[in-house]
Image (tube, rainbow, N blue to C red):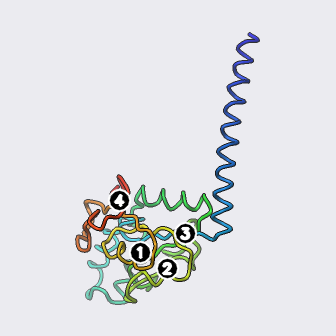
Amino acid sequence: MLEKTKAKIGAGWAALKRLGVLMAIWGVIFSFATISRLAVAFDYDDTLVFSTPAYEKAYAETAQPFTAQFWTVVNQSYDLEKPKLAGCAAAYLFRIFGFQVSIIASRPEAGSEGLRKEWRRLVPKSRFLFAGDRGSKSRFFENGNFLLFFGDGDSDISDARKAKVYPVRVLRSPKSTFKDDYSPGTQGEFVLPLSQY
C-alpha cells in the first residue's frame, strides 16, 4: 500500500514538474511577444471562415452585386459563415502566446459593426481591418511589427512578401465558390496542412 502511494506521489510530482516547465516556456514566449509587440495577421474570407454562404445570400437578395447594399448583406450574414478549424486554431494559439492578432477582410466595411463585434474575443475592433477597394493588403503591415500573414489567395502571398512579412497559405474549402487567384504552393510559400477544413 505504501509503495502504491509513493508511486502515485512520484507520478504526480513528475507531472507537476513537466507542467511547470511548459508554463515557464509559455511565460518566456508570451513576455517576449508582448514586450516586442509582435503581430500576426489573417485574411478573413476562406482563411478564418468559409464565407461562401454569406456571399450567396447577398447575390440572392440584392439586384446589383458589389454595391454598398450588397456588402452590407455580406457583412451582416456572418451567422452563415463557418469557422475554419486550422485558421481559427492558429489565430487563437498566437493570441494565447501574446501576439497581437489582426484580421484583414478583402471587402468594404459597409454594415460591419456586428461582424467586428462577433470577433471581439480574438481581435479588438481597431484590429479588424477592411481592405475593400483600397488596393493591396501590404499597406496594412506598415503600422505594426508583423511576422506572419495567413491568407488563401495568390495576391495575399505576394502582398505579404512586398511588405517583408512571411506568408502562410491556408487552403480554401473545396466548396468555396472563389476559384480565381488560387494556386497553392506555386510561390514557394508554406502551406498549412489540412487547412481546407
The residue that mark 2 highlights is: 141
Which of the 4 image quarters holds residue 7? top right
Q: Amino acid type of disc 1?
A: Ala
Proximity of marks 1 and 2: CB atoms separated by less than 8 Å: yes
Measured from the top left, where is residue 88 in percent x and y? 47, 60
**Gap between marks 1 and 2, in whole Å?**
8 Å
Tag 3's secondary structure? Answer: strand
Which three-letter amino acid code belongs to the residue tagged 2?
Phe
N-terminal-most mark, 1 or 3: 3
**The disc labelled 3 sits on which kind of residue?**
Val
Amino acid identity at mark 4: Val
Pointer 1: what residue?
Answer: 160
In the image: residue 64, left or right of residue 99: left
Residue at disc 2, secondary structure:
helix
* Residue 100 point in image, percent of width and height: 58, 69
Which residue, given by chain and number where applicable, does mark 4 sit on? 191
